[in-house]
Every structure is written in C-alpha cells, then in structure tokens.
Image (spheres, helix red, strand yellow):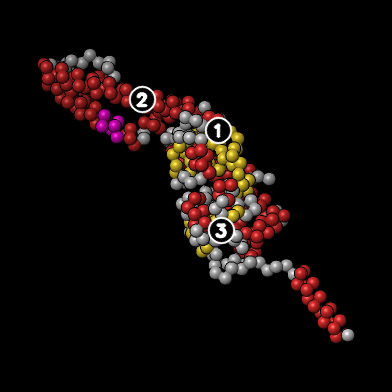
Amino acid sequence: MKGVLFCLFALLSGALAHAETPPAPASPAAPLRVALAGSPPFVMTAKDGAPAGFTVELWQSIAATNGWSGATFRKFDTMDAALDAITRGECDVLVGNTSITSEREKRVEFTQPYYRAGLQIMVAEQRGHLAQFFERLCAPEHLHVLGSVFIGVLIATVVIAAFERRHNPDFPKTRGAGLAESFYYVMGLVLGKSSYKGFSGVLGRLVLVGWMVASLFVVVYVQGVFTSSMTADILQGHIHGPEDLPNKMIGLIGGSQSETYARDRNLDYAAYPGIEAAIADLVKNKVQCVIGDAPVLQYYDYTHPRVPIHEVGPVFQPVNYGFAVPQSSPLREPINLELLHLFEVGYFEKLGAQYFGESYQK
C-alpha cells in the first residue's frame, strides 16, 4: 500500500513540477529567413553593411531571448514584395515598419503592434521668389538653353565689334572699349530696347529681325521660369493638411501605405524607390509635397536640419506597425510574449529615445 501511495505521490509531484516549468523558447531547427523592408530609422544599413535601425534592433533583442541565432537577411525594395515573400513561405518573418491593415491580414499574420504611426505631409520651406527663380534657372535643363544663348551673345558681340570697327569711324578704337560698346548693342537688341541699325541692306535687316525674334524667345523663356517658380511657391503654401491634396502633385514611396492612400482617392502622385529621392524632388519643386509615414518623415527632418523642409497638418490614417509572419506560424506567439515583456520593462522608451530623441511617442 505504501508503495502505491509513494508512486502516486511521485507522479503527482512530477506533474506539478512540469506544470510550473515555463515552456522553453521556440528554437527552429534551421536558421530563420528574415525579410527586411522599410525606411529609416526602422530599417537601415550600417557602415559595415549589416542591417540596422529601430525595428532591426528590436528584432535582434527578440531573437536573442528566444535563441534564434544565425538568421539570414534578405532586403526587399518594397513592402509589397517582402509581404509576397512571406505569403509564399520564402521568408519566416518580415522586419520593418510594416503597417497592420485588414487587407494585409488576409495574406499574412501580424504580431502585437510595437509602434503607433500614421501618414503625414511634408512640404518645402517657402523661400523668396528671387531665390526660387535662380534655383530653377540653374537647373540642368535651363542651363543648356541659357548656355546656348550666352554663346550666341558672345558671337554676336564679336561680329558687331568687327563690323563697326570697319564701317563706323566713331566706334571705339581699343579692343576692350569696342567689345563693351558692341555688347551694349547686343543686350539692347535682346531686351528690345536698342535702335541699332548697323547692318544695311536686305540681308542686314533680315539678320536684325531674326535676332529680335530670338531675343523675344529668350525674354519669354526667362519670364516663364520666374512665373513657374512663383506658382510652385504659392501652391505649396496652400497645403496645410490632407484636404488640400487634390490637384497637387504628390511624391511618395512606391508600394507603401501612402501609395494606397493616394491611389484610393485618385490623387496625382509620383512613386519613388525611397524617401530620399522623393524629398530631393520636393526641394527641386518637381512635386508639391510628400506624404509618408509620420515617423519616417519626422526622422528625416530631424537628421537633415539644413534641408529646407517641414511637416504640416495632423497625422492621419493612423496605423500600427507589427512583425509579419506566414499564416499559422509558430513564431507569432513567442514574438508576442517578448514584445509584451519589453513594453513592461521600459525597453521601448530607451530604444525610441536613441532614434527619435524627445519626439518619441510616450
């Protein structure tokens, strides 16, 4: 009898001990295949070529806790391409600023959200019309035209100087004074303020008429550049929020939530491979604003204080970021447990301050 009781007690003790022992972290047999997609500061590349960024550091902490070592990383150009790889089972987890949406939830599963985000609008700083004028005038497409005009002015200056020195006894005799006088004639013709009639005969008059027509083209061309710079400045100044986006040319990252937002509302937009290219065209006035994930725009503005840009209006289309895994993935639960633990111990405040400073969401 005592033996039976002893066996029962041993079995019960073993069962209780097993129940009180927490489950061991999931440890896949093969190294995890990690997809990377997104924008700074969530996904970046360190100087040594290794993955870096807010979400990458977060993932590395989760992986270390769960004993997931030796992962292989694969970078994707767009979020949609990375999600397709998760859907096809080519990757085990997507690390990036991946927005959790109902449409994406039909293809993959998401973990607990780790960041609150949304869309925001960025515009270029309004500068003086004169500054915008000279900036546009120095664009390559304008420099080619103006360079040709300048060469034409120089040639005309030399030709008129040679002609006048031979046929006009009152023309300055020294080379410098003669070229200056000739240049004065030419610029007068360009601006339509000269009564120069040095070329006689039918051929001479035809040359002068042709020069005046060409001069008119130059004046109209330069005036058009100035007018377009003023128009772009005025249009940008009228963007204060999402309600001002219709009939504006918008820059955004292709395959992102901002493209979905613009496409669903039939807005005019140009898609770019990254936020840097979109903002570069914003500064050049090729687009009137950029819409993108609020933390991405804020981080770029924060780390590029000399670029003449700023965010306007409220954060709209609020979304959360999470890790994406294939349907029924065994990784989802251990990732969720560690995310909750990291929230509880204040890990996110330290990580957020590292990348966003005081602007990190509390």
Q: Which residue is mark 1?
A: 242
Amino acid at circle 1: Pro
Q: Residue 105: x percent and y percent?
A: 58, 51
For discs 3 and 1, the disc positioned in front in the rendered view: 3
| Quarter holding residue 358 | top right
Which sits earlier in the primary sequence, circle 2 or circle 1? 2
Q: Is residue 181 above or below residue 252?
A: above
Residues shaded magenta: 144-149
Residue in front for this viewpoint, 265 or 1: 1
Q: What is the crowding at mark 3: few (fewer than 14 residues within 10 Å), some, or many (at least 20)?
A: many
Amino acid at circle 3: Pro
Q: What is the crowding at mark 1: few (fewer than 14 residues within 10 Å), some, or many (at least 20)?
A: some
Which sits earlier in the primary sequence, circle 3 or circle 1? 1
**Residue pictured at 23% horizontal, 20% vertical:** 212
**Does residue 308 show up?**
no
Q: CA distance from mark 3 to mark 1?
A: 34 Å
**Residue 224: which disc?**
2
Which sits earlier in the primary sequence, circle 2 or circle 3? 2
User: Which residue extends farthest right?
Assistant: 1
For discs 2 and 1, the disc positioned in front in the rendered view: 1
Q: Residue 31: x percent and y percent?
A: 54, 67
Residue in front for this viewpoint, 274 or 177: 274
Residue in front for this viewpoint, 230 or 305: 230
* Residue 146 shown in magenta: yes
Q: Which residue is mark 3?
A: 326
